[in-house]
Image (tube, helix red, strand yellow):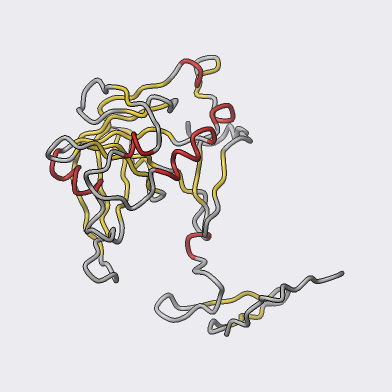
């Protein structure tokens, strides 16, 4: 086997412990101590994570759109979703959580492979008075039950009313780690996202976050019949 080494390779000290088992070796590190790897591996240990593309309105009706990789469905009876706004922007707390707490509504539009570049553009830490729909050249579409607009190009939209915020510890000075929970009050599904009355995940290719700067898409789908639907 030939190993190729970059002339720019930097030796990185390893601080974690190597654990030896009967047939393989693994590492262990305490999360409050250096891990010794080139980048923090934790986000690659919980993957893939669906992306919540959250649109909201500020108190002055300024439109905001931002992707969150800490996002998920929490329960179905009643239907509740969450997104976690963590850390801070250079200008202060994340605009999405500020807006939702102020106005009580948000929409989650599905991020897909076809919209990946637009998702990236809306992740920029721009000032609160910036309209990310315009920044990313996206069209808005009115919602039915809430005021924030939907991403017209997206195949699925989830309209939500604010339920509560759970504040978590934050190690970033002046930062804020929050879980924003919303009650789903309406769902839009484009006809082209359906096949035989079912959402065709492989066709619409939802975008998900891995660790580091890596993403993936859901395009290989299989059924396990014994699982609860």
| Residue 102 at x, y percent in the picture | 13, 43
185 in relation to 42, above or below = above
| Residue 72 at x, y percent in the picture | 38, 43
User: Could you say which quadrant of the image residue 87 lies in?
Assistant: bottom left
| Residue 21 at x, y percent in the picture | 67, 77
Q: In percent of the image, x 24 and y 71: which residue is there?
A: 173
Q: In percent of the image, x 70 and y 73: which residue is there?
A: 24
| Residue 164 at x, y percent in the picture | 18, 46
26 in relation to 127, above or below = below
Q: Quadrant of the N terminus?
A: bottom right
46 in relation to 134, above or below = below
In-image side of 147 versus 13 (left or right): left
89 in relation to 71, above or below = below
User: Could you say which quadrant of the image residue 108 lies in?
Assistant: top left
Query: Is residue 117 or residue 56 the one in the foreground?
Result: 117
In-image side of 54 versus 112 (left or right): left
Q: In percent of the image, x 61 and y 35: which residue is there?
A: 219
In-image side of 220 versus 116 (left or right): right
Query: Is residue 1 or residue 91 the one in the foreground?
Result: 91
Name of the residue lying farthest toward the right: 1
């Amino acid at each position: 086997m030939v190993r190729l080494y970059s002339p720019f390779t930097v030796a990185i000290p390893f601080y974690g412990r190597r654990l030896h088992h009967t047939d393989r070796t693994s590492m262990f590190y305490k999360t409050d101590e250096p891990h010794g790897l080139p980048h923090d591996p934790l986000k690659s240990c919980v993957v893939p994570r669906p992306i919540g593309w959250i649109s909201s309105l500020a108190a002055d009706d300024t439109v905001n759109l931002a992707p969150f990789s800490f996002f998920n469905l929490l329960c179905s009876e009643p239907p509740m979703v969450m997104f976690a706004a963590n850390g801070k922007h250079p200008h202060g707390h994340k605009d999405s959580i500020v807006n939702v707490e102020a106005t009580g509504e948000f929409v989650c539009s599905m991020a897909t492979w076809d919209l990946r570049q637009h998702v990236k553009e809306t992740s920029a830490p721009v000032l609160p008075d910036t309209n990310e729909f315009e920044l990313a050249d996206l069209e808005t579409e009115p919602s039915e039950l809430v005021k924030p607009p939907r991403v017209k190009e997206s195949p699925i939209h989830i309209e939500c009313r604010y339920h509560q915020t759970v504040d978590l510890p934050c190690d970033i000075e002046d930062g804020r780690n929050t879980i924003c929970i919303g009650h789903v009050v309406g769902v839009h599904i484009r006809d082209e996202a359906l096949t035989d009355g079912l959402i065709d995940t492989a066709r619409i290719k939802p975008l998900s976050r891995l660790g580091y700067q890596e993403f993936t898409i859901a395009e290989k789908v299989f059924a396990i019949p014994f699982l609860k639907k």
